[in-house]
Image (cartoon, grey):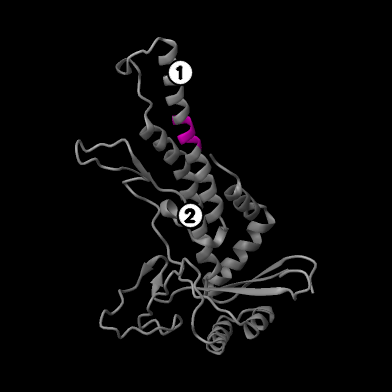
Amino acid sequence: ESDGARFTQAFGNGAYALTTSYGAGKGRPVARGAFLVYGDENYIGPFPKRKPDTKGDAISSPRASSKEFTTPLDENADWTQNNRVPKEYITECMELLKSAEMPGNDVANIVRNSDRFFDLGVYFHNPFSWNGWIREVPDNMNGKSGKFCVLAGDAAHAMPPFLGQGGNQAMQDAYMLASKIYEYNEQIQMQQTRASLNGGESEESLVEPNLKSLLKEYEHRRWLPTTSITAKAALLGYLEIGSGIFGNFRDTFFFVMGKIGVAKKVFLDAATPKM
């Protein structure tokens, strides 16, 4: 039906949908999918209204009355397919679409004909930490071992998916971290070469390359851009699933930002490597 991939967006009252169509291989029909995003009614922004009842009387529907607590969805980082039969999902999704007054029929048609469903709970993770991304592995003898554990990607800065930058930023982390390790190895090699040329200069007279300072450089270079993207993605997510007056503001905001080029700049700026 289509010569290439196609993506469309739809904004409703308190929900956001993304539909996709793309090739599934030669001689096979086009694959189609829909992502439906909506806010957890038991949260105000990233903050829960109240904690779940540990006695087990919390209900499971994510669109339940705000007077009752909804059990938060598991974040399902492995994208494990839910075991419920498609009919149950179709009914639930159609109710969500109806309550959100989602425009058009594209999302509803995909939902009606879907045979696989995945539940993903996307909750905000605080990117700020006084402890940083670097830890030295302690040595039982003197406390310092010179060995380090370093965080990168989602382990360092799990971010909302609304700018599509999680994988991109992880690859930039990996490149930057690898370059610092390479720099450390080069310093070691240069030190050994100088010692050899100087007739076996004693180790005491050589300045030991500082691996920890190089790892800190990696963290300092990557912390600001990833924190900035995390904040922008979180704001964008709340805008996209806005409801009521907030939803009206969202539509006007996106229209104006698109016209004056700010939206394009935000997406391109997030995608541009900063290493």
Rendered-image quadrant of the N terminus: bottom right
Q: CA distance from mark 1 to mark 2?
A: 44 Å
Count of marks placed on residues? 2
CA neighbours of label 1 inside 10 A, class few (<14), some (14 to 19), many (20+): few
Q: Residue 59 in the image: state x and y as whole percent.
A: 37, 85
Q: Looking at the picture, does residue 29 appear above or below residue 219?
A: below
Circles 1 and 2 in contact, beta carbons < 8 Å = no
- Give me the residue at 51% from left, 50% from top: 170
Q: Residue furthest left?
A: 141
Q: Residue 220 in the image: state x and y as whole percent.
A: 43, 39
Q: Residue 76 in the image: state x and y as whole percent.
A: 45, 70
On the picture, is 107 further left or further right than 77? right
SS for tag 2? helix
SS for tag 1? helix
Q: Looking at the picture, does residue 248 appear above or below residue 108?
A: above
Name the amino acid, label 2: Thr
What residue sits right under mark 1 in the picture? 193
Magenta region: 179-184
* Closer to the eye: label 1 or 2: 1
Q: Which quarter of the figure has residue 143?
A: top left
On the picture, is 220 further left or further right than 247? left
Q: Looking at the picture, does residue 153 appear above or below residue 29?
A: above
What residue sits right under mark 2 in the picture? 230
Name the amino acid, label 1: Thr
Which badge, 1 or 2, is on the more N-terminal residue? 1
Q: Which quarter of the figure has residue 274?
A: top right
Which residue is more in the foreground, 103 or 145? Answer: 145
Which residue is more in the foreground, 63 or 178? Answer: 178
Magenta stretch, overall SS: helix
- Give me the residue at 44% from left, 44% from top: 223
Q: Residue 263 in the image: state x and y as whole percent.
A: 63, 55
